Amino acid sequence: MVTSQKHPNTASNAMERAHRAAVSEPPPSTIASPDYADAFEVTRTPTDQRSAEQWARDGFERLPVTMRRPLLLIHRWVLGFRLGPWGSPEHVLGWRIVTSEPELLHLEARSPLLSGHMVWRLHPERLVMTTFLQYEMRRSASMVWAVIGNIHRGGGPYLLNLAAGRCSQPTSRRPPR
């Protein structure tokens, strides 16, 4: 678990950017021993009353279309995930909701190549997103993840910063009327 030396109520800590963290979340019961796991965390204000599910939806919905489309293509066509409908209340970014409680969201996506689990957990002053992968086709999945994993590790903090409202949204290039 990553801890901060800053006082949790200081303004500088409240605006801390998302970053990689140690994996402290236990893997879902459907994964005996994950082949891959990582975690990212972002600070949140104690007054933020959003559920873990709303944090996830806010992050994914705030992704610019220029990033969302390639993400969905990678999930469907490279990783082979069988995704559900984007706008479904039973799915987030097409990932099936396994559990949704105020402090916990567990998402799952499966393919013949690998099974993925995203766990979003709220703590009093931070949100942690943990990803677990189980390789179904060990050799192929590890080679694919060697490339795609770099995109994931770069995008994780960005996604959490979007959810926290700490990234500027692209603005229209049209002049105002």
Image (cartoon, helix red, strand yellow):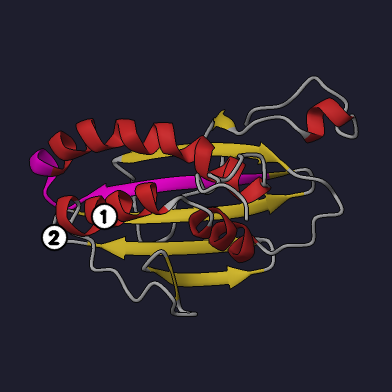
**Cβ–Cβ below 8 Å for labels 2 and 1?**
no
Residue 40: x percent and y percent? 54, 37
> Is residue 28 shown above or below 154?
below
* Quadrant in which residue 11 is drawn: top right
Label 1 neighbourhood size at 10 Å, few (<14), some (14-19), many (20+)? many
Q: Residue 65 versus residue 94: which sits nearer the camera?
A: 65
Magenta stretch in the rendered image: 127-140
Give the residue type at disc 1: His
What residue is drawn where x is 23% and y is 61%? 81
Disc 2 to disc 1, C-alpha distance:
13 Å
Q: Quarter of the image for the N terminus: give it.
A: top right
Residue at position x 68%, y 53% in the image: 122
Q: Position of residue 60 (x, y in %)?
A: 49, 56
As for residue 82 lying within the magenta part, the answer is: no
Name the quadrant containing residue 104.
Answer: bottom right
Predominant SS along the magenta part: strand
Task: Quarter of the image for the C terminus: give it.
Answer: bottom right
**Residue at disc 1, secondary structure:** helix
Q: Residue furthest top?
A: 5
Q: Residues within 10 Å of mark 2 (few under 14, many from 20)?
A: few
Q: Is residue 125 left or right of residue 162?
A: right
Instruction: Estimate the x, y position of residue 78 in percent, counting from the top left.
Output: 16, 50
Q: Secondary structure at mark 2?
A: loop
Closer to viewer: mark 2 or mark 1: 1
Badge 2 is on which residue?
112
User: On the rendered structure, is 28 left or right of 162?
Assistant: left
Taking the spot 23% from the left edge, 68% from the top edge, the residue there is: 82
For label 1, the residue is 75
> Which residue type carries mark 2?
Pro
Residue 172, placed above or below residue 155: below
